[in-house]
Amino acid sequence: MVYPGSPLSRRDALAVAGASLAAVAALPGVARAADAQDSAPRFAPEPDAELTVRHLAAQRVIFSYPGATVPQSLLDLIAAGLVGGVILYGENISSLPQITAAVAQMREANASSPVRAPLLVMTDQEGGKVRRLPGGPVQTAKQIGASPDPGPAAAGAGREAGLLLRSAGLNVNLAPVLDVFRTPGDFEDQYQRSFSMDPAVVATCGTAFIAAQQETGVAATAKHFPGLGPASAKQNTDNGPVTLTTSLSDLRSIDEQPYIPAIAANLALVMMSWAVYTALDPNYPAGLSSKIIRRELRDRLGFEGVTISDAINAGALAAFGTPPQNAVKAANAGMDLILESTRDISHGQAVVDALTAALADGTLDVPESDAALRRIMKLRRELQ
């Protein structure tokens, strides 16, 4: 029997997760054993280091931690190849030199990992009130969208955010917001996180921000698909369930419209919403819905990059199970990366445990897990 987190024999590794391992081994920089029947694919540089099912599961989990000091336990997990990435919040950052040093610690730990790829290190640097690192963009999205020449203004903001994050060692920004707000003071407008009520302006600004930021070497994340623009001020998925009854016509002509040029601009990541969209799937939040992730985002809009969840511990998901259970549901629906945001490392490990068990017992679809792992590793190897 294979126990979650235990090293697999060569034959067991192929039997349990052969397709996933083969997919990883086919990626650049991965060494594959000569005899596929007797040896599991494995990562260099350690010639005898083999990936376990837990390693595979862990590449899909973004951890968080408390305070301004990176816990040794997290550094140990990173060095062991058991962390896919880390998200940084305001409490983790006291100054630019401090967070630069903290990120350097994580990157140094990752150099010892059997998984030969940069660690994903991310934050929310949208601009205006939503900035984790000290620095720009100072203007809010709404101010940019209302400026005389919003496209260049958005490009300047994206470039500024990218250069700042890159200087500190981060390689992913969970921005920009592509939600099209509906009324002044609603969920997205109350903090001026939306560029505009006009989807064409949001499309122009979002695409410019994405292209300019990604030119700096920092991956952009458009959020929150298919759109939280219709949400009222009190409809916050962090706190509880949100159901949006927006028509299919409006969702596609307004809310999804900015994603079309963004995807054409080689957008790296898309963050899914935790709201329920009755016109697309009345039963599940977008991030748990294969209809929305696979059919709408991937098949209809043609997105080939990495999908990432909003916080897996969000109140909107409480009725669907525990965070580890919902992580498995999200992965089965087509979510690539799972964001664990409680600042508790043990909670991140619990998500890894759940994905490990699901991969080992076949609850997670192997071809779909293959595809997710390929996308994640491709992104990581493109970043520094």
Image: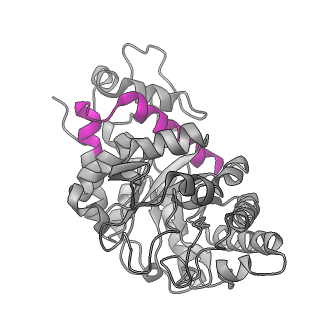
Quadrant of residue 158 in the image? bottom right
Q: Is residue 56 above or below residue 150?
A: above
Q: Is residue 252 above or below residue 332?
A: below
On the image, the x and y values in percent for residue 343 come to 34, 71
Q: Is residue 84 above or below residue 244?
A: above
On the image, the x and y values in percent for residue 31 come to 53, 29
* Horizontal side of residue 337 vs 251, given as left or right: left
The boundaries of the magenta stretch are 355-384
Magenta stretch contains residue 373: yes
Q: Is residue 179 visible?
A: yes
- Image quadrant for the N terminus? top left
Quadrant of residue 62 in the image? bottom left
Residue drawn 66% across and 74% down? 196
Residue drawn 80% across and 69% down? 151
Type of colouring: one colour
- Image quadrant for the C terminus? bottom right
Magenta stretch contains residue 376: yes
On the image, the x and y values in percent for residue 309 come to 43, 56
Label count reads 0
* Horizontal side of residue 201 vs 187, given as left or right: right
On the image, the x and y values in percent for residue 314 come to 32, 67
Residue drawn 76% across and 58% down? 215
**Front residue of 229 and 250:** 250
**Front residue of 310 and 86:** 310
* Direction left: furthest residue: 1
**Front residue of 52 and 294:** 294
Residue drawn 54% across and 84% down? 191
* Horizontal side of residue 240 vs 152, given as left or right: left
Q: Is residue 25 above or below residue 220?
A: above
Q: Is residue 82 visible?
A: no
Q: Main secondary structure of the magenta part?
A: helix
